[in-house]
Amino acid sequence: MPTTNGPSLTNGSDSLHADMPSALINGQHSNEKRRKKLVIDTDGCADDVRGLILALQSEEEVLAVTTVAGSTNVLQAVANVARTLRAVGRPDVPIYKGANASLLLSTRRTDALFFFGLDGVGDSPDAEPKALAADVDAAQTDKPGAVALVELAAKYKHELTLVCIGPLTNVALALKLDPNFATNVKEVVIMGGNVWGCGNVPDRSTAEFNFHCDPEAAHIVLDEMKCPMICVPWELFFLEGKKHEQIVDFHAHLMMDTPLAKYLTAVTSVGRTILAADGKQFAYCDEIAVAIALRPEEIITDSKHLKASVELHGQMTRGQVAINWFDDAWPKADPSHRPNVQFVTSYDALLVDKMVHDAVAKLILDTN
């Protein structure tokens, strides 16, 4: 079962609603399930697309998608998100174009196009729904991503679940635009960072890719957000994924005879080919974060609440999560050092896989 010390996604809003009538908490009728309100912040590549489909095909409400440069540039991310929205028949969901560079321009950027394809989604523009030239212009023009985050968090105060599956540049900018953003958001789920120092950047870095792309942004978010934060670290893919391959066929959903299965087969093709050369499957990564945002109590099977920040200087460690293990070992030594992040250390891979299967199998609207 998940640990319960420190902030938790599963109970972080209880105190906010303690004095509210149950009818207001649960909707007009006490037996009516209140839909979660989600915003997805993404760099729009293959596993992001699979995670985005998981959210869009759920019963929860996706208010908007904000894009950020990461595995690809921000315009390509917009195009990939727009294509995915058409794939699930949801072109009504607004896209807001966010940051196309890290907070410090001197930050060395590493794209992941070798793994995802030059367009970030398998270099298969003719796969249905076909990539359109207009996709790159699909973002709203009235405001950038960070402003949209600030406004949505204020409009849906203490209701918004922010799911971050790319670098955290937009979120850091939102914090600087409006300090109230730190408490207006109900909860944040982040795919990024690491807990045991495992990196996945091809330059001997010990940082996880999303945090490596913008260490300053990650540092700001972990230090300044005041709502419950839950982190899906790289190790959940790198270490847990190896174990889960014994019980989960991560490619089985691609064998289904549905439009979304065919689309995801194309989207994940480059990464699957690379991993297959080493006898590995394209296990879940960003999809875990989305699944946790949707069903945290069921997905998280173990976690640690820790005091964490982000290293900003080391040649090899810049962007790595720095954890105060002293406080974990002796929590009563200094009560002022409260844990600020819940790190997921184990998850229900079979349930996430079922959720992906259900999303891919679900009927969709006309995508033309």
Image (tube, helix red, strand yellow):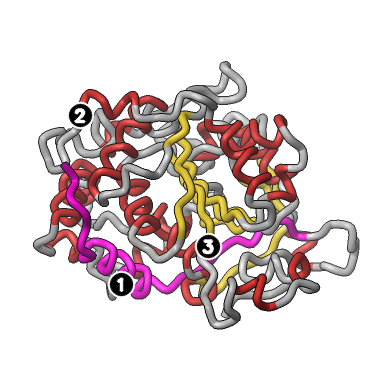
Q: Element under label 1?
A: helix
For mark 1, what is the residue? 354
Tell which of 331 and 37 is nearer to you.
37
Drawn side of residue 7 relative to residue 345, left or right: right
- Which residue sits at x=21%, y=50%? 264
Q: How far apart are marks 3 and 1 (CA)?
A: 20 Å
| Residue 218 percent coordinates (x, y) | 62, 39
> Which residue is more in the foreground, 61 or 48?
61
Does dot 2 land on a helix, a strand or a loop? loop
Where the C terminus falls, by quadrant? top left
Q: Which of marks 3 and 1 is nearer the N terminus?
A: 3
Q: Where is residue 44 in the image (x, y as percent from the top left)?
A: 37, 39
Determine which residue is flagged by label 3: 36
- The picture quadrant where one finds residue 118 is top left
Q: Which residue is drawn at 51% across and 65% down?
A: 35
Mark pair 1, 2: CA separation = 31 Å
Q: Is mark 3 on a helix, strand or loop?
A: loop
Foreground of the two, 5 or 24? 24
For residue 277, say whether it is visible.
Answer: no
